[in-house]
Image (spheres, helix red, strand yellow):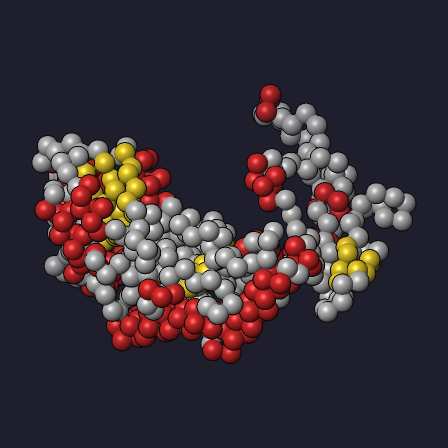
Amino acid sequence: MNDLNPAGWRPAMSADQGDSAAVTTFTGNRALHLEEPLLFEIGAADRCGVDFDEAPDLPDTLGAFRRKARLDLPGLSEPEAVRHYTRLSRQNYAIDLGLFPLGSCTMKHNPRLDEKVARMPGFADVHPLQPQQTVQGALKVINELAHWLIKLTGMHGVAMTPKAGAHGELCGLLCIRAALEARGDAREVILVPESAHGTNPATAAFAGYRVENIPATEDGRVDVAALTARLGPDVAGVMITNPNTCGLFERELKTIADAVHAAGGYVYCDGANFNAIVGRVRPGDLGVDAMHINLHKTFSTPHGGGGPGSGPVVLSEALAPYGPLPFTARQPDGSVRLVEEEDAPGIHPEGFGRMCAFHGQMGMFTRALAYILSHGADGLRQVSGDAVLNANYVLRRLEDVLEAPFGAAGPCMHEALFSDDGFAEGFSTLDLAKGLIDEGFHPMTVYFPLVVHGAMLVEPTETESKAGLDQFIGAMRSLAERAREGDPLLKSAPHLAPRRRLDETLAARKPKLVWKD
């Protein structure tokens, strides 16, 4: 901070395209890309953007709860507040700006039609404590969506309450535990393949099971022989991701399911990648007993920023009686009843109870049903086909400049997997990812799955055009060549972002969460 820069704004170093010479600006602004300090650096605690009348004398009813000192929050004028958040929004990457190549995340375009439907009065304003007769439309949406999810997966029932994928995993495992307890079978092991999502072993451990890993074969799929050899009276089930995190379809899932069932266990399928097979494969036909469906990955609803998410769990005939409350039930007169009590008529007594207080995420249900109805069964089949086509296009266009560990294993599914093998000494996946920011793209998923060193997981969804993919591929090819040649500028990328490369390890281990002047 100095006299010429009283607010303490940080001048920025920028580099022109193709020119390594740095340019310093006093304000930190770069044309229309505006530098933005913190609110605490702009405002002041003794400033206010609103005129208040003199406070009348009020009786002291707060007592010891009355604030003893001024609240140390920055005051801003209305234009300052508007400009601050508008400038911040211009620094945010969004699906409306470009491709999100995040693998295993399915960051797909959310049709505005679905957003409009979710904001309709009666859906946007519904309250979870309203009397059932006043929310029949909302209950019918939930019930209709539930039937679609059962139909698309070939399952017997569905629990709509889980709030997200990992919450759905817990729901499925609690159903498995309830089913085993009902027959007096105390099993304590869940088998999790190396190619499964990272939440799978965490959820199994949280549910009280001991987790054992199952190795993958050289082609990136579950080692069926190792899995079947481990089955026994202590194995409650297997958690398998299909398509898996290597971007490959588990072709032996039916064989695996038959073996697990013969050994007295159950099959949980992580359905996070359902976008790659929706309308083409019904997991129930493959012997799956429980599978969560991320509505925010497959059926349009927003994804990221901590939510909102939704992870309904479809259940086989063997597990459906053990599902949680509440659930919807259509009545003979056409109305829909939300069954909330364990002793209500028609309730299966073996259910394990509730996952949460209320019945799921209404906004997510509305968007997902609007998406399904606007596509229909044939349209959803095209969704998965286009997503797989785009991923294979990326895989084949990049496999000559980036190592594709499973490229020879056949076509990939929803995502293409690469590694940093072949980069110059000292260069890694992180350098390429940071360079991608300078090219105007959000980096792909990096260092996951763990079975591939320096992994780069790219998932282009069905909504990406060939022209858009070609632009992304061009940037990736250029960066891969620079990494292979050892371009020193790549080690310090990004150069054109609002901030240069940060110490991400330090930020994760010692975050500064409180402003101190």
Percent position (x, y) of residue 282?
21, 63
On-image quarter of the C terminus: top right
Viewer-side residue, 362 vs 407: 407
Viewer-side residue, 280 vs 450: 450
Left or right, residue 330 beside residue 468? left
Look at 58% across and 62% down and name the residue there: 484
On-image quarter of the N terminus: top right
Percent position (x, y) of residue 321?
14, 45
Left or right, residue 475 beside residue 35? left
Residue placed farthest to the right in the image?
3
Residue placed farthest to the bottom in the image?
467
Look at 32% across and 35% down and name the residue there: 206
Find residue 232 and report its image quarter: top left
Viewer-side residue, 337 vs 206: 206
Is residue 116 visible in the rendered structure shown here? no
Left or right, residue 150 beside residue 462? left
How many numbered marks appear?
0
Percent position (x, y) of residue 235?
19, 38
Percent position (x, y) of residue 169?
30, 46
Look at 77% across and 39% down and name the residue there: 46
Is residue 200 visible in the rendered structure shown here? yes
Look at 59% across and 24% down and name the residue there: 65
